[in-house]
Amino acid sequence: MSDLQELHQRIASCPDCDLCRTRTNAVPGEGPPDAEILFVGEGPGFYEDQQSRPFVGPAGKFLEELLASIGLRRDQVFITNVVKCRPPNNRDPLPGEIEACRKYLERQIELIRPKVIVSLGRYSLAWFSPGDKISKAHGQVQVKDGIYFIPMYHPAAALHAGNMRKVIEEDFKKIPAVIDRAREAPPEQAAPEPEPEQIRLF
Ligand code: URA
């Protein structure tokens, strides 16, 4: 069994927060273990909790349309969430739930080593970039720990507010160029810490 499969087994029986009491199934995420692009949503909803698969409800249908609009199928990308278990009645995840689940997304990123990460929604943006406002950050390409990072609005936002659809579609159009750029060369890393010898004064 691969490390990623093992991690997903751990998630399936995770007892680390109260969401384990109300979930039907944990939803670790799915996609190729070496996917170039990782989408990170907020948390499973009703359908995801039933099927143990991310983004299989109405928001997932729109996500698949968005992927198709840039020539991608969902089986070519990795899709997961900040919290792996459904918050009751689809309420927002609580800070303690997000923290309890943090290690799982961190490990998924380590194992998958995506070239590009796309956050979907406020909670996912906050996981990567606490304090950033989605109204300002959406569609802006950043670099986080040597990985291209593009915050986007959550696809469900378009289901609730029609004018969001166009905004999300326009933001998605930026993804292919970022993948191309990442394939050519990883983004500039922060300057490495100098070796102790280099900072000796004498
Ligand atoms: N919304 C999310 O954030 N994640 C899912 O998996 C489904 C809906």
Image (cartoon, rainbow, N blue to C red):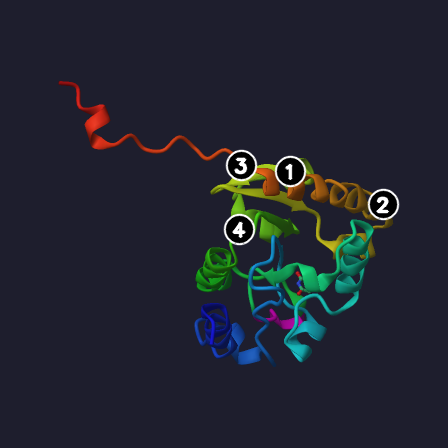
**Label 2 is placed on what type of residue?**
Asn
Any magenta on residue 193? Answer: no
Q: Residues within 10 Å of mark 3 (few under 14, many from 20)?
A: some
Depth check, mark 4 against mark 3: the one in front is 3
Q: Which amino acid is tagged 3?
A: Pro
Magenta span includes 86: yes
Q: Which residue is mark 1?
A: 137
- Real-space CA distance between mark 2 and mark 3, rounded to the nearest whole angstrom: 33 Å
Looking at the rendered structure, the secondary structure element under dot 3 is: loop
Q: Amino acid at mark 1?
A: Ala
* Residue occupying the point 13% across, 18% down: 202
Alpha carbon of mark 4 to alpha carbon of mark 1: how far? 14 Å
Category of crowding for the residue at label 2, using alpha-carbon neighbours closer than 10 angstroms: few (below 14), some (14–19), many (at least 20): few
Secondary element at image label 4: helix
Earlier in the chain: of badge 4 and badge 1, it is: 4
* Residue named by callout 4: 127
The one nearer the camera, 29 or 199, is 199
Describe the element under mark 1 as helix, strand or loop: helix
Q: Quickly name the residue at label 2.
A: 163
- Residue 98, horizontal then vertical, whole percent: 50, 60
